[in-house]
Image (cartoon, rainbow, N blue to C red):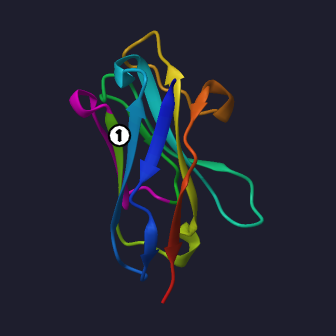
Amino acid sequence: QLQLVESGGGLVQPGDSLRLSCAASGFTLDYYAIAWFRQAPGKEREGVSAISRSGGRTNYADSVKGRFTISRDNAKNTVYLEMSSLKPEDTAVYYCAAAVAYGRDWLGLAQSNYGHWGQGTQVTVSS
């Protein structure tokens, strides 16, 4: 069974850091591009960041550029999202998703590209 499991969320104060993990089971992430999305209460789900199969290409939403870093460790079958200088507006449920990538540097930005999704992890930034 293909499964993605996010972890690392929690309650933090503004300015703090968190590292989210997305671990895959039942399949290898080597052939997948991975993206992080988030959904805040009352808002639509939005793309946060994405990384190609090779790890050589990444993309970030303007709202998180310079604060978030996406990376992957294919040996551990895990993708990470390092979040720093967190703001209250970063509060959301964060989801990771996987898309089959036929090219090592392919990077999909649309949610419709991603066929496998995790259950989400809550990140709350509040003082």
Most foreground residue, 86 or 28: 28
Q: Residue furthest left?
A: 75
Task: Please state the horizontal and vertical placement of residue 98, each as a whole percent of the image.
Answer: 51, 29
Give the magenta-colored segment's residue range: 64-77
58 shown above or below 69: above
Above or below — where is 11 with respect to 1? below
Residue receiving disc 1: 79
Q: Residue at x 52, y 54 (%)?
A: 62
- Can residue 40 be seen by looking at this rendering? yes
- The residue positioned 35% from the left and 65% from the top of the image is 18
Task: Name the residue located 47 percent from the left edge and 16 percent from the top edge.
Answer: 101
Viewer can see residue 83: no
Q: Residue at x 37, y 21 (%)?
A: 28
Q: Is residue 5 left or right of residue 39?
A: left
Amino acid found under the numbered disc labelled 1: Val
Q: Is residue 48 left or right of residue 70?
A: right
Image coordinates for residue 77, horizontal then vertical, percent: 31, 31
Magenta stretch encompasses residue 31: no
Q: Is residue 43 left or right of residue 103?
A: right
User: How dense is the environment of label 1, judged by Cα within 10 Å: few (below 14), some, or many (20 and up)?
Assistant: many
